[in-house]
Amino acid sequence: MERISYAGEQLLTGTEIAQALVAYAQALAETGRAAAVEIPTVDEHGRPGVSQVLVGPASQLVATEVDPGVPDPHDAALVEDLRARTTRLLGSQTAVAEPPDEESDDTFYTDYGI
């Protein structure tokens, strides 16, 4: 599960959803575009909800792994849609978001395209 910090709010959503959203936000920022995206969320008690997030060039999203002890929201169709949108925006720049190689000295990476 990931906690997304966005516009002073905290949203709990599934890890795949959060990663796809952050990648899409980056692609939108790189192309100077914006989009509204609805994502499934849960509150700290596990009650489901939906949040609408506006992402674009000025978005400041922070996704942090958390374990609140509630079920992780999943939406495979949304994740696939966000990945497809990201690919269309970035074209040939796409790459799977992965942490740096264990043997690498690089501690930061910025290519989150999916």
Image (tube, rainbow, N blue to C red):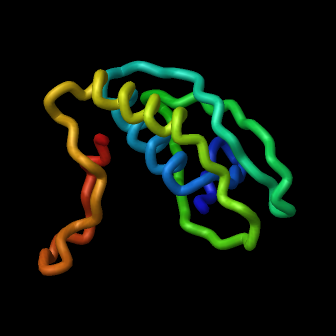
Left-right relation of 54 to 84: right
Left-right relation of 108 to 36: left
Q: Which is more toward the observer, 64 or 9? A: 64
Q: Residue at x 80, y 47 (%)?
A: 48
Residue, far bottom: 103
Q: Residue at x 41, y 19 (%)?
A: 33
Q: Where residue 95 appears, x then y in whole percent?
A: 21, 44
Q: Where residue 80 appears, x then y in whole percent?
A: 44, 35
Quadrant for the N terminus in the image: bottom right
Figure check: 72 above or below 55? below
Q: Residue at x 48, y 21 (%)?
A: 34
Q: Which is more toward the observer, 41 or 110? A: 41
The quarter holding residue 75 reads top right
The quarter holding residue 45 reads bottom right
Q: Where residue 84 appears, x then y in whole percent?
A: 36, 28
Quadrant for the C terminus in the image: top left
Q: Residue at x 59, y 23 (%)?
A: 36
Q: Where residue 31 appears, x then y in whole percent?
A: 31, 23
